[in-house]
Image (spheres, rainbow, N blue to C red):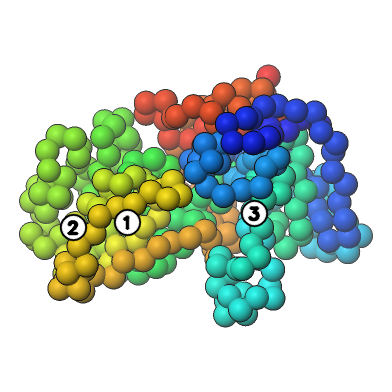
Amino acid sequence: MRAVRLEAVGNIGLREVPKPAPGPEDVLVKIEACGVCGTDRHLFHGEFPCTPPVTLGHEFCGTVEAVGAAVSGIAVGDRVTGDPNIACGRCAHCHAGRVNLCSNLRAIGIHRDGGFADYVLMPQRQAFRLPAGLKPTHGAFCEPLACCLHGVDLAAIRPGASVVVLGGGVIGLLVVQLAKLAGAATIILSTRQASRRALAEELGATATIDPSAGDPIAAVAGANGLAPGGADVVLECAGVRDTVEQSMRMARAGGTVVIVGVMPQGMKVEIEPFDLLFRELKVLGSFLNPFTHGRAAQLIASGAIEIDKLISKQVSLEEAPQVIANPPAPGEVKVLVVPGRG
């Protein structure tokens, strides 16, 4: 079969590899769509830990082609999405219900072969069924939506709350929709790209700002009806130094900041501990998708989340290495790799 392999940092290409066979508790899935994530680009550049050589791709949807002898509840022909994060179930974090912090965490598409391929093999417990009629391109959004759900859960957005979302990529645009579903009265998205600002307003943002047009902190506080103290909740979804630093200055006293975006490993930001103390800010990191993948699949299946407007383009496996090795094109939100193309 074909697979997009990260051989080493900066070395990626399409290869012919053996088609895997399921063990007793495994399912073999024929990939129909797999999303390109910012993490894939971090992996290519060596900015996020992984174990190459490995087939990338952790946002996948497909149809079950074969199952192991001990598998039950999932059958050949079922459409499924896969939770890529495999916890050991034995360590102290797993016993405490913090499976995303598992000491032995292994992720499909990072530590073991993933979904930029014709087929992917995964344990049955990582598979979640989807309606047969659901578009596979929609099913590929379950993993990023699951990560967003964890961030929004941590933010504890209450009906009537004010929310600022920093970053207009796919994560920011999904968070805007989740904040709306949570009942936020004010949702402000900040991004430099005009097309993403327009899309955010279509998806539920009550206002948007261009951080390059002036002081974004003043714009959030003054131009959009918030008190000078800032927002109840700020979700950083860009994973860059400027927005992480801005996030803590955009929250009101007693507010909550959730860091959802992934910054390159080793990058530092400046904070003022006195400010965090004096305004008693709650600053949280949101890592992965503990127990949220099933909810994401249900939300996607329900149609409550707009997906089609987030898909910038679909590419073949042959085109995928070039997409991963280069930064997103202007205005790009989500690129999907579809093995059946080409």
Q: Please report contact status of discs 2 and 1: CB closer than 8 Å, yes or no.
A: no
- The reply to whether residue 300 is visible in this rendering is yes
**Left or right: 273 with respect to 320?**
left
Instruction: Give the alpha-carbon distance from disc 2 to disc 1, as whole Å.
Output: 12 Å
Q: Earlier in the sequence, mark 3 or mark 2?
A: 3
Q: Nearer the viewer, residue 198 or 101?
A: 101
According to the picture, the residue beneath numbered tag 1 turns out to be 235
The correct choice, above or below, for 104 with respect to 18 in the image is below
The dot on residue 68 is none
Residue type, label 1: Leu
According to the picture, the residue beneath numbered tag 2 turns out to be 249
Instruction: Give the alpha-carbon distance from disc 3 to disc 2, as whole Å.
Output: 34 Å
Q: Earlier in the sequence, mark 2 or mark 1?
A: 1
Q: Which image quadrant for residue 91?
A: bottom right
Instruction: Give the alpha-carbon distance from disc 3 to disc 1, as whole Å.
Output: 25 Å
Residue beneath the point at 15% across and 73% down: 278
According to the picture, the residue beneath numbered tag 3 turns out to be 107
Residue beneath the point at 45% across and 29% down: 327
Q: Which image quadrant for residue 251?
A: bottom left
Q: Nearer the viewer, residue 324 or 138?
A: 324
**Left or right: 319 with respect to 178?**
right
